[in-house]
Image (cartoon, helix red, strand yellow):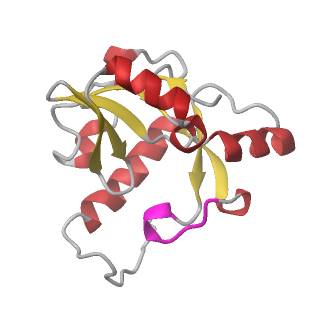
């Protein structure tokens, strides 16, 4: 299975949840959450208001998943392929080798913007940098209605 507890190149739970690491880049969208695990794409699992949520790093959106950690564990085990990204992670690793600690598979064209869930749309990226990059997208699109046309400008 491809579930990743929060441990990114020596970064533990407390450090991962520090505002200065990546959370502040979401400009309030990630506030009041305790992030404790992530899928292979860096999608976050978190606790907020005593419930477990999925945090979409591209949209900066929370989706309620279950009532508690026990429910999260049961749900993850029953639907691990969808919730962990296992099928694509397995294919990636067969073709490219193990995904190193601190790295995640990120889409070249963000999933939120129509990018495909396939190997051709994935690249290996630093987990923290991936969160910061996607925070920039999330902040820019947060108030747009679904189906809006956007122009993605990438500036170094």
Q: Is residue 109 visible?
A: yes
When asked about the image quadrant of residue 141, the answer is: bottom left
Residue 117 left/right relative to 145:
right
Q: Position of residue 97 (x, y in %)?
A: 82, 35
Q: Residue at horizontal 43%, vertical 64%?
A: 112
Residue 154 position (above or below residue 13): below
Task: Please say whether residue 112 is one of the residues in the magenta stretch.
Answer: yes
Per the rendered image, the range of residues in magenta is 110-117
Which residue lies most toward the bottom here?
149
Residue 134 left/right relative to 99:
left
Q: Quadrant of the N terminus?
A: top right
Q: Is residue 156 visible?
A: no
When asked about the image quadrant of residue 154, the answer is: bottom left
Q: Residue at horizontal 36%, vertical 80%?
A: 150
Residue 10 left/right relative to 131:
right
Q: Position of residue 131 (x, y in %)?
A: 41, 44
Which residue lies most toward the right here?
95
Magenta span: helix, strand or loop, mainly?
A: loop
When asked about the image quadrant of residue 139, the answer is: bottom left
Residue 57 position (above or below residue 76): below
Residue 79 left/right relative to 86:
left
Q: Position of residue 123 (x, y in %)?
A: 66, 52
User: Of 68 and 154, which appears nearest the observer?
Assistant: 68
Task: Please say whether residue 141 is one of the residues in the magenta stretch.
Answer: no
| Number of residue marks | 0
Q: Position of residue 74 (x, y in %)?
A: 45, 24
Q: Residue at horizontal 16%, vertical 45%?
A: 28
């Amino acid at each position: 299975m491809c579930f990743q507890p929060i441990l990114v190149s020596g970064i533990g739970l407390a450090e991962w949840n520090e505002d200065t690491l990546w959370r502040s880049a979401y400009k309030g969208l990630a506030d009041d959450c305790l992030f404790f695990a992530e899928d292979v794409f860096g999608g976050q699992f978190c606790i907020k208001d005593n419930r477990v949520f999925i945090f979409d790093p591209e949209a900066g959106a929370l989706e309620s998943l279950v009532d508690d950690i026990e429910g999260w564990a049961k749900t993850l085990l029953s639907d691990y392929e969808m919730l962990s990204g296992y099928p694509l992670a397995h294919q990636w690793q067969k073709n490219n080798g193990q995904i190193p600690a601190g790295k995640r598979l990120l889409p070249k064209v963000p999933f939120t913007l129509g990018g495909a869930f396939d190997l051709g749309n994935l690249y290996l990226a630093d987990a923290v940098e991936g969160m910061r990059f996607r925070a920039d997208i999330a902040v820019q699109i947060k108030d747009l209605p679904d189906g809006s046309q956007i122009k993605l400008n990438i500036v170094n």
